[in-house]
Amino acid sequence: MAYLLDADVFIRAKNLHYGLDFCPAFWEWLIKENAAGNLYSIEKVGDEIFALEDDLSKWAKTLSPSFFLKPDTTIFPALTIVSAWASNGQRYEPSAVSTFLQVADYYLVAQAKAGQHTVVTHEIPSASTRKIKIPDACIGLGLKCITPFEMLRHERARFILGPRP
């Protein structure tokens, strides 16, 4: 079991709480946890980040190739399960299902299902029928979904103030 991070975790961290310029400890913690096998994201999330062509994408390009998991044969049954969940008996509009099955969220949830991982996202459950949110898919599929702050507290992450370089 590991944590799988959604793109918004990286983007909001960079833009709001843990800027690369003033909170390097957060980014170092992500790298350390990945090296320990406790934290990953997926290739499609990496693609979204690389497309930004900013400081975040520069940082992401320095990561180990194992940080953004590539799809392998273990994910195929999970993709089928997630697709079936989204398509059958849910309250979502057909366009919401179609969109979900084409974006990184679908693959993130499927990777979590394949490995029984915990999904980490800022998204919150929604009653909307127009968009499938990650937490709703996780709830429907019996997966754990938490916020980045819950992950950091659970892992007892500490970002200690140090002298200026």
Image (cartoon, rainbow, N blue to C red):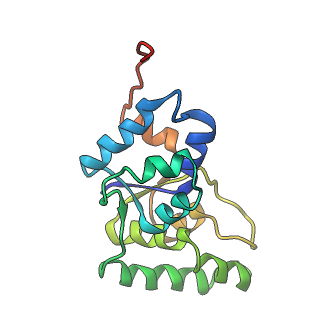
- Looking at the image, residue 156 sits to the left or right of residue 139; the answer is left
- Looking at the image, residue 73 sits to the left or right of residue 60; the answer is left
At horizontal 36% and vertical 78% (from top left) the residue drawn is 75
Residue 146 visible (yes or no): no
Count of residue discs: 0
Where, quadrant-wise, is the N terminus in this rendering? bottom left
Where, quadrant-wise, is the C terminus in this rendering? top left
Residue 108 visible (yes or no): yes
In the rendered view, tell whether residue 133 sits above or below residue 12.
below
> Which of 105 and 82 lies nearest the eye of the viewer?
105
At horizontal 52% and vertical 83% (from top left) the residue drawn is 83
In the rendered view, tell whether residue 71 sits above or below residue 87.
above
> Which of 3 and 57 lies nearest the eye of the viewer?
57
At horizontal 49% and vertical 29% (from top left) the residue drawn is 23
Please provide percent x and percent y for residue 133.
Answer: 63, 64
In the rendered view, tell whether residue 151 sits above or below residue 133.
above
At horizontal 40% and vertical 66% (from top left) the residue drawn is 112
Outermost residue on the left side: it is 36
Q: Quadrant of residue 136?
A: bottom right
Please provide percent x and percent y for residue 2.
Answer: 33, 54
Please provide percent x and percent y for residue 64.
Answer: 30, 54
Please provide percent x and percent y for residue 144.
Answer: 45, 57
Q: Quadrant of residue 16?
A: top right
In the rendered view, tell whether residue 62 sits above or below residue 24.
below
